[in-house]
Image (cartoon, grey):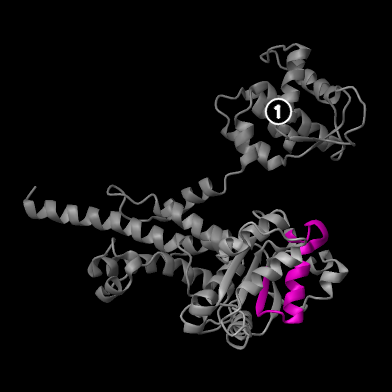
Amino acid sequence: MSKKQNMAIDFQDNMILLTRKYLKRKIMCPETKFRHHVKERVHILDLLKRTVENGESNSALLIGPRGCGKTTLINSVLKELSSLKSFKDEALVVNLHGLVHTDDRLALKDTTRQMQLENAVGDKVFGTFAENLSFLLECLKSGDKTQSKPVIFILDEFDLFCAHRNQTLLYNLFDVAQSAQAPICVLGITCRLDVIELLEKRVKSRFSHRQIFLFPGDTSGSDQPTSAFDDRLKLFQHLLSLPDDENVNETDQQYEDCKINPQFGARWNEYIKSLTENMTMVNFLKRMYQLDVSERSFRNFLALVISSLSEKHPKLEVNDFVEANKFFHQDDKVLTLQGLSVLELCLIIAMKHQTEIYDDEPLNFEMVLNRYVKFANQNSSIQTVQRPVIMKAFEHIKNLELIQPVGGPNTRVEKEHQLYKFSLGWQQIADAVKNYPELPTEVSQWAVSSLQ
């Protein structure tokens, strides 16, 4: 092989590795440019601007299902505001999360840290939560004692803060916002539609009742009206495209360490465009979109596909997406079933047979044992197993939570007669039986007969 050919191969391999690095970073890094939900974004931008520039106090709730872009929307608004000198110099942003700040003491401690007032608080002892919060806000007063620094509180998983004792944090934040003691904006993010009903009466009366709803599949803000799936197809092409202009590499510092050759980028983009016109690929993406509209999970899926790129595999084929989807959407319960012993899988099949015959009625160990023994007696190749061993296998299934106990914890029943609800679907059992290595033919035939 000539030296020129070697150089061409090395160049190609290097570009593939840089492509993988570039695309992974592009897919996994959250974008500051927010698409869609234009009205809602303008509404929130206006609220925060009024707090920063005019000293107004506001409160609002951003409500929408998980993965619809609530946090991305807030981040894009804050990114835009950070270019304003008044925001950069004056405003403070305090981020609190319901899963992290599980009580008001933790929330207040982290608020103090984010406002950089640990030294001001020092060893002071405060009688109440309200005193502590008002002291923190007082510390932010500017030199003329008339104007405070604006503070933006962002409460993620807002509904979890409603479970705090007496809702003290929410009460004091909304009270400060309502009475205009200091310019603050309280912005809650939640996926619960009934979140207002979780607020105590005194907290509810101080909340502005400004609710902003985000709905998945909203394509408002697109240059041309498109369907939700067409928008997903555009996102697919955008996320997998490379820069084919030298100027892009020079201006975007984020990708400085993985500069793509423009000619290679142009060829790659042509190929990605051809994928979006391939009907097999389009139908596959459409099925995926029907199952899950979340952009976050779609990005995670694409990152998995990109990982398959290598020097030996320089192109993304339709089959790569299909294989990645199998891995990405694996059913945990099917994998659990494939890890069971043959005896335990037989008990699972017996349970399914029992629930099918008796219309999903609860079952106990004795019922399952009788059905298994009946099957074992009919098939001479199935080895006879003693009752204690079968009981042990049944308890292992119970510990894996493939069956759920029926009745309260105080119910005193012998373990052989304790009722359980079977929590597996017929398709899950069929998939597990199909992929189970070296399963006896009699067992697989029994499984099929019980599922029909």
The residue closer to the viewer here, 226 or 205, is 205
Crowd tier of the residue under label 1, counting other residues whose Cα lies within 10 Å: few below 14, some 14–19, many 20 or above: some
Residue position marked by numbered label 1 in the rendering: 446
Q: Is residue 215 above or below residue 198?
A: below
**Residue 71, percent from left and from top:** 59, 67
**Residue 424, percent from left and from top:** 73, 39
Quarter of the image with the C terminus is top right
Residue at the (65%, 74%) spot, across then down: 138
The residue closer to the viewer here, 239 or 427, is 239
Residue at the (89%, 22%) spot, across then down: 414
Tell me if 195 is positioned left or right of 310 in this view.
right
Magenta span contains residue 178: yes
**Residue 230, percent from left and from top:** 53, 73
Amino acid type at circle 1 is Trp
Q: Quadrant of residue 211?
A: bottom right
Secondary structure of the residue carrying numbered label 1 = helix
Q: Give the range drawn in magenta.
A: 161-188
Magenta span contains residue 170: yes
Tell me if 386 is positioned left or right of 256 in this view.
right
Q: Quadrant of residue 129?
A: bottom right
